[in-house]
Image (tube, rainbow, N blue to C red):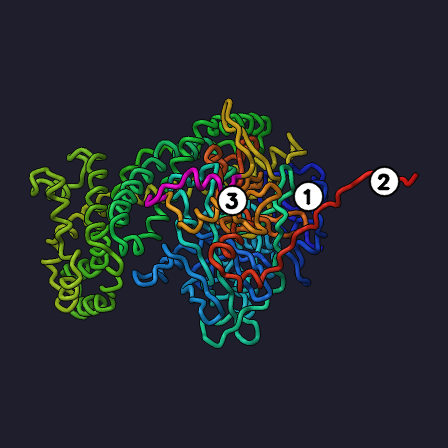
Amino acid sequence: MKKLSLFFAVMFAMTGIIKADEGMWLPMFVERLNYVDMEKMGLQLTPEELYSINNSSLKDAIVGLSNGSKPRGFFCTGEIVSTNSLLFTNHHCGYSSIAALSTVEHDYLNEGFWAKNFDEELPAEGVSASFLVRMEDVTEEIFSVVNDTMDFMERNSAIKKKIKEIEESASEDGKLNPVIKGFFEGNEYYMFVYKTYTDVRLVGTAPQSIGKFGGDTDNWMWPRHTCDFSVFRVYADENGEPAEYSANNKPLTPKHHLPISLDGVKENDFTMIWGFPGTTERYMTSFGINYNVDYFYPIVYEVFKAETDVMDKYMMIDKAVNINYADTKAGLANTWKNFEGQMKMLRKNKVAERKAELENNFLNWVEQDENRKAEYGEVLPALEEMYKELSNEAGLLYFPNFLSQLNPLAVATEFMSYLSVASDKETSKEEKAEAANSLKELDVDAMFEGLDPRVEHDMFIEVLKIYSRQFETEQLPESLQKMLKKYKGDWNLLGEAVCSSMFSNPEEIKALIENPNVKKIAKDPAMTLLLGLVEQISGIIPAYQMANMIIAENDHLFVKGLREFYAETQPDKVLYPDANSTLRMSYGSVKDYQPADAISYDYVCTANGILEKYIPGDFEFDSPKRLIDLIEARDFGQYADENGELITCFLSTNDITGGNSGSPIMNGKGELIGLAFDGNWEAMSGDVNFEPNLQRTINVDIRYVLFIIDKLSGATNLIDELDIRKSMPEPIRTEECVME
């Protein structure tokens, strides 16, 4: 028998004292860790029905969505809801595919799309759907190649080599996609073996005025009235195996699909969510939190907010721009608002202060034992020093980097290698010719596809303004000082010169590729600025990389020590691993919350809120007239609750994060009751520290989803595919009559 890992052994011993709500749990351990607790809360399925390797189980209906055929992580989650592998996920998860398939003539993003049969379904190019086959503990195998004499880099190198070896062995000659991930900052390792299908097709979507109702304003906010869903289907070859897109492929016959309940939710109802949460940092130190809040997040927020503001301006007036920039803008906007929320709530909820208190307790425990002092005594001081070093260099690194990612600098980057080779006197004619030929591999049309010159110009100017405010002239590299002097110290003139660069013009670039001119490239204002930015950051990159390596090494030691600390001082405390884009289960209940004094939020929202928020023609709060008419007529059909209301969204206490978007939220019978799509604003600190009194998952009610598919869109062919269930009402009890 293999020796149990510390993670398994500790958790196995503590099955009776697990706290509900908090934690993203590995399904492999559900029977030993979570089942008794879940059953008490309302779970009606057996452990084997939840997770089984050999038999059909709930895990087989959960899908990781990613880009590419060999995913190492997932951007969203989906769930199989029919015997023909119909897949539900969020609208914002399908957003990129919907936008890519949209044109001015067929504007699926703004007008919606519903396939009436298999032949009308549209290929979602690049999207793949992965099903978990099995997971297993490989910690012992991984650690067999490391020893105490290795330094951190040697240890990591040996581990990476072993991971590659194990993954290749488990792939079955490429039929499966094994992925090994580290847990507890590299103190545990588990392998996840997936079967990945690359033929995924768009089946249906509501217009974004429904799927994204409320836009950035409502993002992470409650109450919520967004019907955040889209519908796809997974296809396979005639043998049910993964295959590239082909007209001959057939809908995959899944091992399991989720039935759907129309019963709705009541407060305190049991809920569980399965999915692929991306990243949490529950073991981050106070030093890391302060660095993010004070330095990193503000920089990203400022730049990304400026870029999306420019996009918004043109998207509102130009339909083509709206379509072409929709996906990019959505990603940037989501990031800046996320970082804004984290900045505010990490401070408000005093997370760094609470972490610092834990760290002091940990240090006191370390000081009580010489062996502990030798192993862990310098861990926290090292982390403090390295984060201080990063703080000093944050602006110097990130502002030039963000500027260099914008056109025309991003285009100029493609010519840097050629310029370096061609301008080097030591380079042979053959090498120069080879470098020139490599330019012909550039797809110039693809580089500019979907880009609007007005948007690109204004974004660059706005970010350049931000960059110019960060540094005094004398702080700039000499090359940038000379450039600025050329334009009389006027950043606006410099910016306009860069925007007029030949790297902004596809035809000039094509001509340059056919006849490369070193002097012309070197003197171009975009290239001059780019080289100056590279010079500015190149000097600090080695120190930055070293600081991050030291942080990683000491994070590993801190978590290792922290587990020992808790095992000794709080033996009843269960530690769970951070999210890392592997299949997890969370469980909790339907519940309201009170975010502040005298404020109390209900656990459900109704369609009445759509009428209250509705602003005709507004970028965020417009709605289709037919939807407004149906709501005003209260024509909800079978999707109304017992009071005749249409519930749009509801709250639960489940622990989720990014990557869980699209995850199924289920009742105790394993029936689908909604789709998880967001967290709440007041708990934006939740990725670093779970907030039980505040943290809620926002879910779109499945009845609202079906209402949109059925009553609004008339896609009854999809309704007919589903296993829809509704409990019979309780009989009316009357007193027994006695004949006299």
In the picture as drawn, the residue positioned furthest to the right comes out as: 740
Secondary structure category for the residue under label 2: loop
Location of residue 694 with respect to 454 vertically, above or below: above
Name which residue lies at 35% across and 44% down. Answer: 616
Type of amino acid under label 3? Thr
Pointers 2 and 3 in contact (C-beta within 8 Å): no
Q: Nearer the viewer, residue 612 or 7?
A: 612
Give the farthest residue toward the front.
740
Residue 519 locus on image (x, y percent): 9, 58
Three-letter code, disc 2: Glu
Q: Which residue is mark 1?
A: 38
The spot of residue 102 in percent (x, y) is 35, 61
Mark toward the viewer: 3 or 1: 3
| Magenta region, residue range | 605-620
The residue labelled by disc 3 is 648
- Within 10 angstroms of label 3, few (less than 14), some, or many (20 or more) residues? many
Q: Earlier in the sequence, mark 2 or mark 3?
A: 3
Give the mark nearest the N terminus, 3 or 1.
1
Query: Gap in Å between the C-alphas at discs 3 and 1?
Result: 26 Å
Q: Quadrant of residue 336?
A: top left
Which of the marked residues, 1 or 2, is nearer the chain's N terminus?
Answer: 1
Which marked residue is nearer to the observer: mark 1 or mark 2?
A: 2
Residue 607 is covered by the magenta coloring = yes
Residue at the disc numbered 2: 736
Of residues 455 and 21, the one drawn nearer to the viewer in this rendering: 455
Report the Cα–Cα distance between label 1 and label 2: 39 Å
Q: Is residue 89 magenta?
A: no
Locate residue 91, reporting x and y percent.
45, 52
> Label 1: how many residues lie within 10 Å, few (<14), some (14-19) or many (20+)?
many
Camera-side mark, 2 or 3: 2
